[in-house]
Image: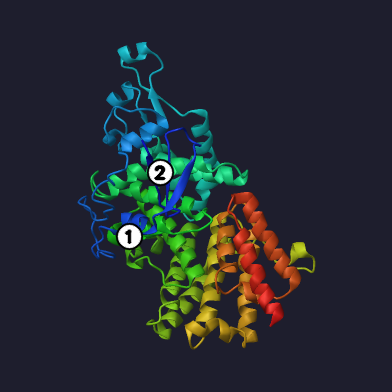
Amino acid sequence: MVMLMMLMMMGRRFLGGRCGWFGGGRFLDETDEVRGLYEGQQDGKDGQDGQDGDGGVGVCEGEDEGGLSPDEEVGGLFGNPSEPTDHLWGSGSSSAASQGLLDGGLIRAPESDAAVGLGLPLRLSFNEREATLMRNYVENMALWADITDPHRHFEIEVPVRAVQEPVLRLAIFAFSSRHVERQRKGNEAEALQYHNACLQLLIPALSGAKGGVNDVVLATVAILRQHEEMEYDDNQFHLTGAMHIMNTVSSFGSSGGLGEAAAWLCLRDDIHVSLISQKPLRTNLECFHRSDIFVRDDDFAWASRMVFLLAKILRCAFNQVSESTELQIIAREVEEWNASKPPSFEPLRALPRGKEVSRRFPELWMLLPVHVVGVQYYHIAKIVLAFSCCPSPVLAYESFRNSRNTEKTIRHHLFMVLALAKSNSKAENTLFTARHSLVASNEPGGWVIRHRLDQEAAEILLREMWTRTGWDVAASIQSLREQWADESDS
Protein backbone atom coordinates (compact mmCIF):
# COMPACT_ATOMS: atom_id res chain seq x y z
CA MET A 1 0.00 0.00 0.00
CA VAL A 2 1.37 3.41 -0.95
CA MET A 3 1.99 5.80 1.96
CA LEU A 4 0.67 9.34 1.53
CA MET A 5 2.69 12.02 3.30
CA MET A 6 1.55 15.63 3.32
CA LEU A 7 4.48 17.87 4.11
CA MET A 8 3.17 21.37 4.82
CA MET A 9 6.55 22.84 5.48
CA MET A 10 7.78 21.98 1.99
CA GLY A 11 4.60 21.99 -0.07
CA ARG A 12 5.48 18.54 -1.34
CA ARG A 13 4.08 15.03 -1.04
CA PHE A 14 6.35 12.13 -0.28
CA LEU A 15 5.30 8.83 -1.80
CA GLY A 16 7.10 5.72 -0.68
CA GLY A 17 6.56 2.13 0.40
CA ARG A 18 6.15 0.87 3.94
CA CYS A 19 9.79 -0.13 4.12
CA GLY A 20 10.83 1.69 7.29
CA TRP A 21 11.99 5.16 8.09
CA PHE A 22 14.47 5.62 5.32
CA GLY A 23 12.88 3.84 2.37
CA GLY A 24 12.95 5.29 -1.11
CA GLY A 25 10.39 7.81 -2.22
CA ARG A 26 9.62 10.75 -4.43
CA PHE A 27 8.24 14.22 -3.86
CA LEU A 28 5.30 15.71 -5.72
CA ASP A 29 4.36 19.40 -5.71
CA GLU A 30 1.13 19.99 -3.81
CA THR A 31 1.49 23.61 -2.77
CA ASP A 32 -2.14 24.55 -3.40
CA GLU A 33 -3.45 21.43 -1.68
CA VAL A 34 -1.39 21.96 1.44
CA ARG A 35 -2.29 25.63 1.69
CA GLY A 36 -5.94 24.61 1.46
CA LEU A 37 -5.59 22.53 4.62
CA TYR A 38 -5.32 25.72 6.66
CA GLU A 39 -7.37 28.05 4.48
CA GLY A 40 -10.15 25.85 3.15
CA GLN A 41 -12.66 26.41 5.95
CA GLN A 42 -12.02 30.05 6.83
CA ASP A 43 -15.02 31.64 5.11
CA GLY A 44 -13.63 35.10 5.72
CA LYS A 45 -13.51 34.81 9.49
CA ASP A 46 -10.05 36.28 10.00
CA GLY A 47 -9.95 38.76 12.86
CA GLN A 48 -13.22 37.55 14.39
CA ASP A 49 -13.88 35.66 17.57
CA GLY A 50 -14.75 32.07 16.96
CA GLN A 51 -13.53 29.91 19.79
CA ASP A 52 -16.10 27.23 19.44
CA GLY A 53 -15.41 23.71 18.36
CA ASP A 54 -17.49 23.64 15.21
CA GLY A 55 -14.88 24.14 12.55
CA GLY A 56 -13.92 27.77 13.04
CA VAL A 57 -10.42 27.06 11.83
CA GLY A 58 -11.20 24.12 9.62
CA VAL A 59 -8.57 22.34 7.63
CA CYS A 60 -10.46 19.82 5.61
CA GLU A 61 -13.77 18.04 5.45
CA GLY A 62 -12.11 14.65 5.45
CA GLU A 63 -9.13 12.66 4.36
CA ASP A 64 -8.00 12.29 0.78
CA GLU A 65 -9.40 9.07 -0.58
CA GLY A 66 -5.94 7.63 -1.01
CA GLY A 67 -4.69 8.75 2.43
CA LEU A 68 -4.16 6.82 5.61
CA SER A 69 -6.17 7.43 8.73
CA PRO A 70 -4.23 8.95 11.64
CA ASP A 71 -4.08 5.66 13.53
CA GLU A 72 -2.96 3.78 10.42
CA GLU A 73 -0.21 6.29 9.69
CA VAL A 74 1.07 6.47 13.26
CA GLY A 75 0.78 2.72 13.45
CA GLY A 76 3.05 2.44 10.45
CA LEU A 77 5.64 4.50 12.31
CA PHE A 78 5.31 3.34 15.88
CA GLY A 79 3.45 0.03 15.82
CA ASN A 80 -0.06 -1.19 14.98
CA PRO A 81 -2.50 0.40 17.42
CA SER A 82 -5.90 -1.15 17.62
CA GLU A 83 -7.44 1.81 19.44
CA PRO A 84 -9.28 4.54 17.50
CA THR A 85 -7.74 7.89 16.67
CA ASP A 86 -9.12 9.71 19.69
CA HIS A 87 -6.64 7.90 21.93
CA LEU A 88 -3.87 9.17 19.71
CA TRP A 89 -5.17 12.70 19.97
CA GLY A 90 -6.19 12.65 23.60
CA SER A 91 -4.34 12.12 26.81
CA GLY A 92 -4.02 8.37 26.50
CA SER A 93 -6.53 6.47 28.59
CA SER A 94 -5.60 3.59 30.84
CA SER A 95 -7.45 1.18 28.58
CA ALA A 96 -5.34 2.25 25.64
CA ALA A 97 -2.21 1.97 27.70
CA SER A 98 -3.10 -1.46 29.02
CA GLN A 99 -3.28 -2.71 25.46
CA GLY A 100 0.25 -1.45 24.84
CA LEU A 101 -0.82 1.44 22.61
CA LEU A 102 2.18 3.25 21.12
CA ASP A 103 0.45 6.60 20.87
CA GLY A 104 2.65 9.05 19.07
CA GLY A 105 5.85 7.28 19.95
CA LEU A 106 5.44 7.23 23.74
CA ILE A 107 5.16 3.74 25.20
CA ARG A 108 2.67 3.46 28.06
CA ALA A 109 3.42 0.17 29.72
CA PRO A 110 3.30 -1.33 33.23
CA GLU A 111 6.46 -2.34 35.01
CA SER A 112 5.16 -5.91 35.09
CA ASP A 113 2.02 -7.97 34.64
CA ALA A 114 1.65 -7.96 38.39
CA ALA A 115 1.47 -4.19 38.35
CA VAL A 116 -1.66 -4.35 36.21
CA GLY A 117 -3.34 -6.80 38.59
CA LEU A 118 -2.53 -4.58 41.57
CA GLY A 119 -3.77 -1.46 39.83
CA LEU A 120 -0.40 0.26 40.14
CA PRO A 121 0.37 3.40 38.06
CA LEU A 122 1.56 2.82 34.55
CA ARG A 123 5.13 3.72 33.64
CA LEU A 124 5.65 6.25 30.86
CA SER A 125 8.84 5.76 28.90
CA PHE A 126 10.56 7.03 25.77
CA ASN A 127 12.85 4.95 23.67
CA GLU A 128 16.45 6.17 23.49
CA ARG A 129 15.99 8.24 20.34
CA GLU A 130 12.83 9.94 21.57
CA ALA A 131 14.46 10.73 24.91
CA THR A 132 17.40 12.27 23.06
CA LEU A 133 15.11 14.42 20.92
CA MET A 134 13.04 15.60 23.88
CA ARG A 135 16.13 16.43 25.90
CA ASN A 136 17.64 18.33 22.98
CA TYR A 137 14.45 20.38 22.66
CA VAL A 138 14.29 21.24 26.37
CA GLU A 139 17.98 22.06 26.76
CA ASN A 140 18.78 23.72 23.45
CA MET A 141 15.63 24.91 21.68
CA ALA A 142 12.86 25.87 24.11
CA LEU A 143 14.49 29.19 25.01
CA TRP A 144 14.01 30.31 21.41
CA ALA A 145 10.27 30.38 22.12
CA ASP A 146 10.44 31.50 25.76
CA ILE A 147 12.74 34.48 25.40
CA THR A 148 10.08 37.03 26.45
CA ASP A 149 8.10 34.63 28.66
CA PRO A 150 8.91 34.77 32.41
CA HIS A 151 7.04 31.49 32.98
CA ARG A 152 8.98 29.61 30.26
CA HIS A 153 5.94 27.74 28.99
CA PHE A 154 7.72 26.08 26.08
CA GLU A 155 10.54 24.80 28.29
CA ILE A 156 8.48 23.73 31.30
CA GLU A 157 4.82 23.22 30.39
CA VAL A 158 5.09 22.02 26.79
CA PRO A 159 7.28 18.96 27.52
CA VAL A 160 5.06 17.96 30.45
CA ARG A 161 1.88 18.26 28.41
CA ALA A 162 3.56 16.52 25.49
CA VAL A 163 3.73 13.35 27.61
CA GLN A 164 -0.07 13.19 27.37
CA GLU A 165 -0.58 14.99 24.05
CA PRO A 166 0.80 12.97 21.09
CA VAL A 167 0.26 15.78 18.58
CA LEU A 168 2.45 18.10 20.65
CA ARG A 169 5.01 15.40 21.29
CA LEU A 170 5.38 14.59 17.60
CA ALA A 171 5.85 18.26 16.76
CA ILE A 172 8.69 18.42 19.28
CA PHE A 173 10.27 15.27 17.85
CA ALA A 174 10.07 16.65 14.30
CA PHE A 175 11.59 20.02 15.25
CA SER A 176 14.30 18.51 17.44
CA SER A 177 15.20 15.86 14.89
CA ARG A 178 15.68 18.45 12.18
CA HIS A 179 17.82 20.53 14.52
CA VAL A 180 20.03 17.57 15.46
CA GLU A 181 20.42 16.28 11.93
CA ARG A 182 21.10 19.73 10.50
CA GLN A 183 23.91 20.27 12.96
CA ARG A 184 25.63 17.04 11.98
CA LYS A 185 24.43 17.10 8.36
CA GLY A 186 22.60 13.81 8.77
CA ASN A 187 19.54 12.24 7.16
CA GLU A 188 16.42 14.40 7.55
CA ALA A 189 13.91 11.67 6.68
CA GLU A 190 13.23 11.06 10.38
CA ALA A 191 12.09 14.65 10.90
CA LEU A 192 9.78 14.38 7.88
CA GLN A 193 8.24 11.21 9.26
CA TYR A 194 7.57 12.77 12.65
CA HIS A 195 6.16 15.85 10.94
CA ASN A 196 3.78 13.78 8.87
CA ALA A 197 2.60 11.74 11.85
CA CYS A 198 1.94 14.99 13.74
CA LEU A 199 0.04 16.37 10.79
CA GLN A 200 -2.22 13.33 10.64
CA LEU A 201 -3.30 14.03 14.22
CA LEU A 202 -3.53 17.79 13.77
CA ILE A 203 -5.93 17.72 10.83
CA PRO A 204 -8.95 16.35 12.80
CA ALA A 205 -8.42 18.97 15.51
CA LEU A 206 -8.28 21.82 13.03
CA SER A 207 -11.38 20.57 11.26
CA GLY A 208 -13.34 20.80 14.50
CA ALA A 209 -13.70 17.07 15.06
CA LYS A 210 -11.91 17.01 18.41
CA GLY A 211 -13.46 19.81 20.43
CA GLY A 212 -12.11 22.87 18.71
CA VAL A 213 -8.83 24.71 18.64
CA ASN A 214 -7.16 24.97 22.04
CA ASP A 215 -3.77 26.04 23.38
CA VAL A 216 -2.21 22.67 22.56
CA VAL A 217 -3.19 23.06 18.91
CA LEU A 218 -1.74 26.57 18.67
CA ALA A 219 1.44 25.51 20.46
CA THR A 220 1.76 22.55 18.09
CA VAL A 221 1.38 24.75 15.02
CA ALA A 222 3.86 27.25 16.50
CA ILE A 223 6.47 24.50 16.93
CA LEU A 224 5.78 23.17 13.44
CA ARG A 225 6.32 26.72 12.19
CA GLN A 226 9.77 26.78 13.83
CA HIS A 227 10.46 23.43 12.19
CA GLU A 228 9.28 24.82 8.87
CA GLU A 229 11.65 27.79 9.13
CA MET A 230 14.61 25.42 9.05
CA GLU A 231 13.63 24.29 5.56
CA TYR A 232 15.71 25.50 2.62
CA ASP A 233 12.61 26.98 0.97
CA ASP A 234 10.27 28.45 3.56
CA ASN A 235 6.75 28.12 2.14
CA GLN A 236 5.19 29.55 5.35
CA PHE A 237 2.31 27.08 5.42
CA HIS A 238 2.35 26.70 9.19
CA LEU A 239 2.77 30.46 9.61
CA THR A 240 -0.37 30.89 7.52
CA GLY A 241 -2.09 28.34 9.74
CA ALA A 242 -0.99 30.10 12.91
CA MET A 243 -2.24 33.45 11.60
CA HIS A 244 -5.64 31.96 10.72
CA ILE A 245 -5.94 30.43 14.18
CA MET A 246 -4.97 33.62 16.00
CA ASN A 247 -7.11 35.88 13.84
CA THR A 248 -10.10 33.60 14.25
CA VAL A 249 -9.73 32.71 17.93
CA SER A 250 -8.69 36.21 18.93
CA SER A 251 -8.66 35.49 22.68
CA PHE A 252 -5.32 33.66 22.46
CA GLY A 253 -3.35 36.92 22.49
CA SER A 254 -4.58 37.78 25.98
CA SER A 255 -5.55 34.37 27.36
CA GLY A 256 -2.52 33.89 29.59
CA GLY A 257 -0.81 30.54 29.93
CA LEU A 258 0.45 28.45 27.03
CA GLY A 259 -2.05 29.90 24.56
CA GLU A 260 -0.75 33.45 24.95
CA ALA A 261 2.87 32.28 25.00
CA ALA A 262 2.28 30.54 21.66
CA ALA A 263 0.55 33.65 20.30
CA TRP A 264 3.58 35.82 21.11
CA LEU A 265 5.88 33.28 19.46
CA CYS A 266 3.74 33.39 16.31
CA LEU A 267 3.70 37.20 16.37
CA ARG A 268 7.49 37.36 16.50
CA ASP A 269 7.70 35.01 13.56
CA ASP A 270 5.19 37.11 11.61
CA ILE A 271 7.44 40.10 12.35
CA HIS A 272 10.45 38.27 10.91
CA VAL A 273 8.59 37.38 7.72
CA SER A 274 7.27 40.92 7.36
CA LEU A 275 10.81 42.28 7.62
CA ILE A 276 12.10 39.92 4.98
CA SER A 277 9.21 40.19 2.53
CA GLN A 278 8.50 43.91 3.09
CA LYS A 279 4.82 43.10 3.36
CA PRO A 280 2.39 44.21 6.06
CA LEU A 281 2.01 42.16 9.19
CA ARG A 282 -0.70 39.50 8.95
CA THR A 283 -1.48 39.26 12.65
CA ASN A 284 -4.54 41.06 13.97
CA LEU A 285 -2.85 43.02 16.76
CA GLU A 286 -6.15 43.71 18.49
CA CYS A 287 -6.04 40.20 19.93
CA PHE A 288 -3.16 41.32 22.18
CA HIS A 289 -4.78 44.49 23.50
CA ARG A 290 -5.97 42.86 26.73
CA SER A 291 -2.65 41.16 27.45
CA ASP A 292 -1.28 41.87 30.90
CA ILE A 293 2.09 42.89 29.42
CA PHE A 294 0.63 46.39 29.08
CA VAL A 295 -0.01 46.68 32.83
CA ARG A 296 2.89 44.70 34.25
CA ASP A 297 6.18 46.45 35.01
CA ASP A 298 8.66 43.58 34.92
CA ASP A 299 11.44 43.33 32.33
CA PHE A 300 9.68 40.62 30.34
CA ALA A 301 6.67 42.89 29.92
CA TRP A 302 8.92 45.74 28.82
CA ALA A 303 10.56 43.56 26.18
CA SER A 304 7.17 42.32 24.97
CA ARG A 305 5.93 45.90 24.63
CA MET A 306 8.87 46.65 22.36
CA VAL A 307 7.99 43.58 20.27
CA PHE A 308 4.45 44.91 20.01
CA LEU A 309 5.67 48.38 18.99
CA LEU A 310 7.74 46.88 16.17
CA ALA A 311 4.67 44.92 15.08
CA LYS A 312 2.67 48.17 14.95
CA ILE A 313 5.39 49.77 12.83
CA LEU A 314 5.42 46.89 10.36
CA ARG A 315 1.63 47.00 10.10
CA CYS A 316 1.96 50.56 8.83
CA ALA A 317 5.35 50.73 7.13
CA PHE A 318 4.55 48.37 4.26
CA ASN A 319 0.91 49.37 3.97
CA GLN A 320 0.32 51.80 1.12
CA VAL A 321 -2.85 53.21 2.71
CA SER A 322 -1.29 54.02 6.10
CA GLU A 323 -0.84 57.66 6.99
CA SER A 324 2.55 59.05 7.99
CA THR A 325 1.03 60.59 11.12
CA GLU A 326 0.34 57.10 12.49
CA LEU A 327 3.98 56.14 12.06
CA GLN A 328 5.06 59.37 13.71
CA ILE A 329 2.92 58.55 16.74
CA ILE A 330 4.43 55.07 16.97
CA ALA A 331 7.93 56.55 16.54
CA ARG A 332 7.32 58.70 19.61
CA GLU A 333 6.16 55.63 21.53
CA VAL A 334 9.38 53.85 20.55
CA GLU A 335 11.50 56.71 21.88
CA GLU A 336 9.41 56.86 25.05
CA TRP A 337 10.11 53.15 25.55
CA ASN A 338 13.84 53.69 25.12
CA ALA A 339 13.95 56.71 27.41
CA SER A 340 11.98 55.10 30.24
CA LYS A 341 13.09 51.44 30.02
CA PRO A 342 14.44 49.95 33.28
CA PRO A 343 18.19 50.28 34.01
CA SER A 344 18.52 46.50 33.60
CA PHE A 345 18.25 47.02 29.83
CA GLU A 346 21.55 48.89 29.80
CA PRO A 347 24.66 46.86 28.81
CA LEU A 348 26.79 45.39 31.56
CA ARG A 349 29.83 45.95 29.35
CA ALA A 350 30.13 48.03 26.19
CA LEU A 351 33.18 48.26 23.97
CA PRO A 352 33.37 50.21 20.70
CA ARG A 353 34.11 48.52 17.41
CA GLY A 354 37.71 48.12 16.37
CA LYS A 355 39.78 47.70 13.24
CA GLU A 356 40.23 43.92 13.44
CA VAL A 357 37.65 41.75 11.67
CA SER A 358 36.77 40.13 15.00
CA ARG A 359 35.86 43.53 16.45
CA ARG A 360 34.03 45.17 13.56
CA PHE A 361 30.82 45.23 15.61
CA PRO A 362 30.57 46.74 19.11
CA GLU A 363 30.67 44.41 22.10
CA LEU A 364 27.52 44.65 24.22
CA TRP A 365 27.05 42.31 27.17
CA MET A 366 23.43 42.29 28.34
CA LEU A 367 22.15 40.97 31.66
CA LEU A 368 19.66 38.37 30.35
CA PRO A 369 18.39 37.16 26.95
CA VAL A 370 15.14 39.07 27.47
CA HIS A 371 17.12 42.33 27.61
CA VAL A 372 18.91 41.43 24.39
CA VAL A 373 15.57 40.98 22.62
CA GLY A 374 14.08 44.21 23.93
CA VAL A 375 17.02 46.36 22.87
CA GLN A 376 17.52 44.51 19.59
CA TYR A 377 13.89 45.04 18.58
CA TYR A 378 14.29 48.71 19.46
CA HIS A 379 17.14 49.06 16.96
CA ILE A 380 15.20 47.16 14.31
CA ALA A 381 12.28 49.52 14.88
CA LYS A 382 14.62 52.47 14.30
CA ILE A 383 15.81 50.92 11.02
CA VAL A 384 12.27 50.43 9.73
CA LEU A 385 11.26 53.93 10.81
CA ALA A 386 14.30 55.38 9.01
CA PHE A 387 13.40 53.96 5.63
CA SER A 388 9.68 54.57 6.20
CA CYS A 389 10.35 58.32 6.31
CA CYS A 390 10.99 58.33 2.56
CA PRO A 391 8.24 60.00 0.48
CA SER A 392 7.44 56.77 -1.34
CA PRO A 393 7.89 53.43 0.50
CA VAL A 394 8.10 51.67 -2.85
CA LEU A 395 11.17 53.71 -3.80
CA ALA A 396 12.59 53.78 -0.29
CA TYR A 397 15.80 51.91 -0.96
CA GLU A 398 16.67 53.91 -4.07
CA SER A 399 16.09 57.08 -2.09
CA PHE A 400 18.46 55.89 0.61
CA ARG A 401 21.31 55.61 -1.83
CA ASN A 402 21.11 59.39 -2.20
CA SER A 403 20.90 60.06 1.50
CA ARG A 404 24.16 59.52 3.34
CA ASN A 405 22.71 60.61 6.67
CA THR A 406 19.92 58.06 6.48
CA GLU A 407 22.39 55.40 5.43
CA LYS A 408 24.59 56.14 8.44
CA THR A 409 21.57 55.95 10.74
CA ILE A 410 20.57 52.57 9.35
CA ARG A 411 24.13 51.26 9.51
CA HIS A 412 24.48 52.31 13.15
CA HIS A 413 21.30 50.52 14.22
CA LEU A 414 22.09 47.48 12.07
CA PHE A 415 25.52 47.15 13.69
CA MET A 416 23.81 47.31 17.09
CA VAL A 417 21.44 44.50 16.05
CA LEU A 418 24.39 42.38 14.94
CA ALA A 419 26.47 43.29 17.99
CA LEU A 420 23.74 42.22 20.41
CA ALA A 421 23.43 38.85 18.68
CA LYS A 422 27.20 38.32 18.58
CA SER A 423 27.86 39.38 22.17
CA ASN A 424 25.19 37.32 23.95
CA SER A 425 25.57 33.65 23.15
CA LYS A 426 22.71 32.47 25.37
CA ALA A 427 20.20 34.55 23.40
CA GLU A 428 20.53 32.33 20.34
CA ASN A 429 17.34 33.38 18.64
CA THR A 430 18.67 36.93 18.37
CA LEU A 431 20.93 35.43 15.71
CA PHE A 432 17.80 34.70 13.68
CA THR A 433 16.63 38.29 14.07
CA ALA A 434 20.06 39.55 13.07
CA ARG A 435 19.97 37.38 9.98
CA HIS A 436 16.49 38.63 9.06
CA SER A 437 17.67 42.22 9.46
CA LEU A 438 20.84 41.65 7.49
CA VAL A 439 19.89 39.41 4.62
CA ALA A 440 16.62 39.59 2.73
CA SER A 441 15.40 40.43 -0.74
CA ASN A 442 15.71 44.23 -1.06
CA GLU A 443 15.68 44.43 2.71
CA PRO A 444 17.43 47.35 4.41
CA GLY A 445 20.69 46.00 5.64
CA GLY A 446 23.07 44.36 3.24
CA TRP A 447 23.79 47.31 1.00
CA VAL A 448 24.62 49.69 3.84
CA ILE A 449 27.61 47.56 4.82
CA ARG A 450 30.21 48.94 2.45
CA HIS A 451 33.56 48.19 4.09
CA ARG A 452 35.09 44.86 3.16
CA LEU A 453 36.01 43.93 6.75
CA ASP A 454 32.46 44.73 7.92
CA GLN A 455 31.13 42.45 5.20
CA GLU A 456 33.51 39.71 6.27
CA ALA A 457 32.45 40.10 9.91
CA ALA A 458 28.78 39.84 8.92
CA GLU A 459 29.45 36.65 7.00
CA ILE A 460 31.36 35.18 9.95
CA LEU A 461 28.36 35.92 12.20
CA LEU A 462 26.03 34.10 9.83
CA ARG A 463 28.32 31.08 9.74
CA GLU A 464 28.39 31.09 13.53
CA MET A 465 24.59 31.02 13.49
CA TRP A 466 24.72 28.02 11.14
CA THR A 467 27.08 26.17 13.49
CA ARG A 468 25.19 26.94 16.69
CA THR A 469 21.58 26.56 15.57
CA GLY A 470 21.59 24.31 12.52
CA TRP A 471 19.95 26.99 10.38
CA ASP A 472 21.37 26.78 6.86
CA VAL A 473 22.51 30.27 5.87
CA ALA A 474 24.31 29.43 2.62
CA ALA A 475 21.62 31.12 0.53
CA SER A 476 21.70 34.16 2.82
CA ILE A 477 25.46 34.51 2.45
CA GLN A 478 25.17 34.21 -1.33
CA SER A 479 22.46 36.88 -1.38
CA LEU A 480 24.65 39.23 0.65
CA ARG A 481 27.63 38.68 -1.61
CA GLU A 482 25.52 39.55 -4.63
CA GLN A 483 24.30 42.76 -2.97
CA TRP A 484 27.84 43.72 -2.08
CA ALA A 485 29.10 42.90 -5.57
CA ASP A 486 26.40 45.12 -7.07
CA GLU A 487 27.51 47.95 -4.79
CA SER A 488 31.17 47.57 -5.71
CA ASP A 489 30.31 47.64 -9.42
CA SER A 490 28.10 50.74 -9.17
Please state which amino acid type lies under the numbered disc 1: His
From this viewpoint, which residue is outermost toward the right? Answer: 356
Q: Mark 1, residues whose alpha carbon is within 10 Å: few (<14), some, or many (≥20)?
A: many
- Residue 488 x, y percent position in the rendering: 71, 78
Instruction: Name the colouring of the figure.
Output: rainbow
- Residue 307 is marked as none
Quadrant of the image containing the C terminus: bottom right
> Which residue is more in the foreground, 408 or 488?
488
Give the secondary structure at mark 2. helix
Q: Amino acid at mark 2?
A: Asn
Spot the residue most to the left. Answer: 54
Q: How many residues crowd mark 2 within 10 Å: few (<14), some (14–19), many (20+)? A: many
What's the residue at 56%, 68% (across, down)? Answer: 440
Residue 429 on image: x %, y %? 55, 55
Q: Residue at x 68, y 65 (%)?
A: 458
Q: Which residue is mark 2?
A: 196
Tell me which residue sits at (25%, 64%) in the image: 45
Q: Quadrant of residue 2?
A: top left
Residue carrying label 1: 244
In this view, 173 is above or below 358: above
Residue 157 seen by the camera: no
Q: Which structural element holds mark 1?
A: helix
Residue 143 visible to the viewer:
yes
Is residue 2 or residue 222 the one in the foreground?
2
* Label 2, label 1: how far apart the Cα atoms are: 21 Å
